[in-house]
Structure formats: C-alpha cells, structure tokens
C-alpha cells in the first residue's frame, strides 16, 4: 500500500527525519522555494501535516490540502493551528503534552534564578576582568522564601509550583477556578491581584484568543518595579508593547522570556535592555524530550492511518 502523504512544515532532528521518511511519503514544505507552486503540486496527495508548535498550520495551508485528515503538532501548544478550519473539515489534531512538562518547568525556574541572581552579568564580570579590576559583583535579589504567582496552573504551571516549593516560596495562582491539586497554594482569580502580591510572576497559560494580552499594562504595573515576569508559554499572552515600555521606564523590574512576537526575529527594543533575560524558545529543548516529542508526532500519525485511537488528541 502507498505510504500516506505527509506535509512537513518545519525541520526535525535527524533522528526524527529518518523514521518519518521511512513510514510516510514526506513533502518538505520548509525547503520549497516557491511555496504556492509546491502546494499546488503536492497538496492533493497530502493526508497528514507534521508541524511544530510555533509554526502550526494556517487556514490557507489546510485549504491547500483537500484530502487532509490529521495535523500532528510537535509541541504542546496548538494555538498556531487554525482549529476552526480543521474542525469544519473534521480534520484531527494532535499535540505532544506531558513529555515536555518537566523540561519547560525546569527552564522557567532556571530563568528566575539566573535573572534574579544576575548570573549572566556575573559571568561577564569574571570573563572581562571586572572582578579583578573593580572588586565585588553588585548584590542581587534573593529567590528563596519570596512570593511567586503562577498564571495558569495546568501541567506546566503545577510543575513550576512543585519546584518553587523547594525554595520555600509563598505560591499563589490564577486560573479559571480553584484546582483540587493546588495544595498549599492560594487561589487568586484576578491576574492583577495575583501580580500585586507577587515578586515573580510565571506565565504558564495555554494560549488562545481568550488569553491574548491577558498580561497587559495593569498586570505588568501591578507586578511593579521590584517584580519579575517570566514567560514560558506564548508571546501572545503578554502585551509586548506594554512590557517593553514598562521595562524601559522601570515600571517593571525585570523579565525573563523564552518566547517573542514574530520570533525568531524580535523587537530590537529588547536588545537594548539590561533588565531582561532573552532565551531562544528552547524550554522543551533537551535531547530526551525532543526525542519523546518526535516519537509522539509519529505515533499519532501511525495510529490515525492504522485506524487506532489517537494517543494525544486535541480535536
Ligand atoms: C515548540 C512549543 O514546539 O511545546 C510547545 O508548544 O512551543 C515548543 O515545544 C518547539 O520549539 C518545537 O518546535
């Protein structure tokens, strides 16, 4: 039987490319120079899309594949997939939850520590000779025992909280309602009130049209000149213009960000700031997790084309 046609939207590590190509007839969209002509040629033969979290699948792409049955996302976030377009045609959508939760939480907590203790500047202090020339490195702020707010206590938010408990932090969270598993954490429904009582605010929400700019001027200013915003979710959850202005004017103390509007290009205003830690969207970027994500992408495709239940369905 002919191998199902798959449209691959972005590159994967070599260890994923080989088994993907062995099982499917893969069309590499990201390598096509003339995307339009490429889609006209291969679109009708495409039964599945294999994409990445940040790349998703637009309505135009979905429409260019009239025989599309499934979109398999390499990532937990599926906000870049046009779910309405998929739903209209009964196209299944899968993602890769759980396997990346711990790594994403680890990076969020690491960003808090690195930023709060000024470790990037401290490294430079050693390397550029400032230590010997100028003496002691400027004092930074403590992490342990302080107040952390978690916006979105889903799987990743919960793992962040679990780690923060090890730092004896006072933890509160906002979500659509109190969570039964949030032992020892205070529920604060209003994100502005959450920010107001927090030294560190972690954004761990699944992004959607409803959560767009949920962290706006009011939340940012409530966090205040001593506060730190940490985003390991999606850029769209934060009003980036307001964030930049608050960082520039000192209305917000600092930020640690793994995601940006328009990434991998980012607003050049970020590069001028000394109070922001910038990371290249790599919270799930460990060998172990990326291998598990790639496997899950393929397992969902294989299950679908074998008529078996999907492992991690979104739609
Ligand atoms: C990306 C992510 O998918 O899980 C998500 O939602 O954003 C990431 O894991 C990753 O960069 C791979 O594309």
Image: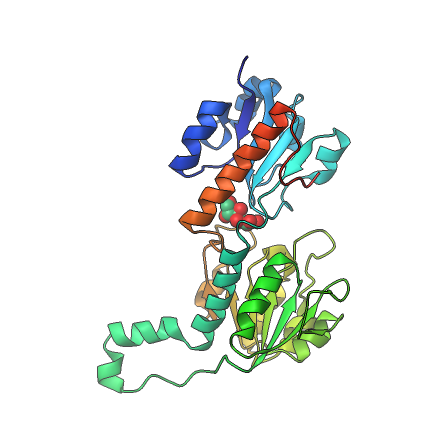
Question: Quadrant location of the N terminus?
Answer: top right
Q: Position of residue 80 (x, y in %)?
A: 62, 44
Q: Nearer the viewer, residue 41 or 171?
A: 171
Residue at coordinates 34% horizontally, 76% vertically from top-left? Answer: 122
Q: Does 76 appear above or below 145?
A: above
Q: Nearer the viewer, residue 91 or 42?
A: 91
Residue at coordinates 74% horizontally, 38% vertically from top-left? Answer: 84
Quadrant assignment, res 272: bottom left
Quadrant assignment, res 121: bottom left
Q: Position of residue 56 (x, y in %)?
A: 59, 40
**Color theme of the render:** rainbow
Q: Is residue 37 visible?
A: yes
Residue at coordinates 68% horizontally, 33% vertically from top-left? Answer: 92
Left/right of residue 79 with respect to residue 42 in the rendered view: right
Q: Position of residue 77 (x, y in %)?
A: 61, 48
Q: Is residue 244 visible?
A: no
Q: Position of residue 303 (x, y in %)?
A: 60, 29
Residue at coordinates 22% horizontally, 83% vertically from top-left? Answer: 132
Left/right of residue 274 with respect to residue 52 in the rendered view: left
Q: Does 222 appear above or below 272?
A: below
Which residue in the rendered view is the most extreme toward the top?
1
């Amino acid at each position: 039987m002919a191998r199902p046609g798959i449209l691959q939207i972005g590159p994967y590590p070599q260890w994923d490319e080989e088994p993907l190509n062995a099982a499917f007839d893969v069309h590499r969209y990201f390598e096509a120079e003339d995307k339009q002509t490429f889609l006209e040629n291969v679109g009708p033969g495409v039964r599945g899309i294999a994409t990445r979290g940040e790349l998703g699948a637009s309505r135009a792409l979905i429409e260019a594949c009239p025989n599309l049955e499934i979109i398999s996302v390499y990532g937990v976030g599926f906000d870049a997939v046009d779910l309405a377009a998929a739903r209209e045609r009964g196209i299944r959508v899968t993602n890769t939850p759980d396997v990346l939760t711990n790594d994403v939480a680890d990076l969020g907590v690491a960003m808090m520590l690195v930023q709060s203790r000024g470790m990037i500047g401290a490294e430079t202090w050693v390397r550029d000779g400032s230590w010997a020339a100028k003496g002691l490195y400027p004092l930074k702020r403590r992490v342990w025992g302080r107040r952390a707010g978690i916006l979105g206590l889903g799987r990743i938010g919960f793992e962040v909280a679990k780690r923060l408990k090890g730092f004896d932090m006072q933890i509160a969270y906002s979500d659509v309602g109190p969570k039964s598993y949030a032992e020892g954490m205070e529920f604060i429904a209003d994100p502005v009130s959450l920010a107001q009582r927090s030294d560190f605010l972690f954004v761990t929400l699944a992004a959607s049209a409803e959560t767009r700019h949920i962290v706006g001027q009011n939340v940012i200013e409530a966090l205040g000149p001593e506060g730190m915003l940490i985003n390991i979710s999606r850029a769209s959850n934060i009003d980036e213009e307001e964030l930049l202005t608050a960082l520039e004017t000192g209305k917000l103390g600092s930020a640690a960000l793994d995601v940006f509007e328009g990434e991998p290009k980012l607003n050049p205003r970020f590069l001028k700031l000394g109070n922001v830690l910038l990371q290249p969207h790599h919270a799930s970027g460990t060998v172990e997790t990326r291998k598990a994500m790639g496997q899950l992408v393929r397992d969902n495709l294989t299950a679908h084309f074998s008529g078996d239940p999907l492992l991690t369905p979104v739609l």
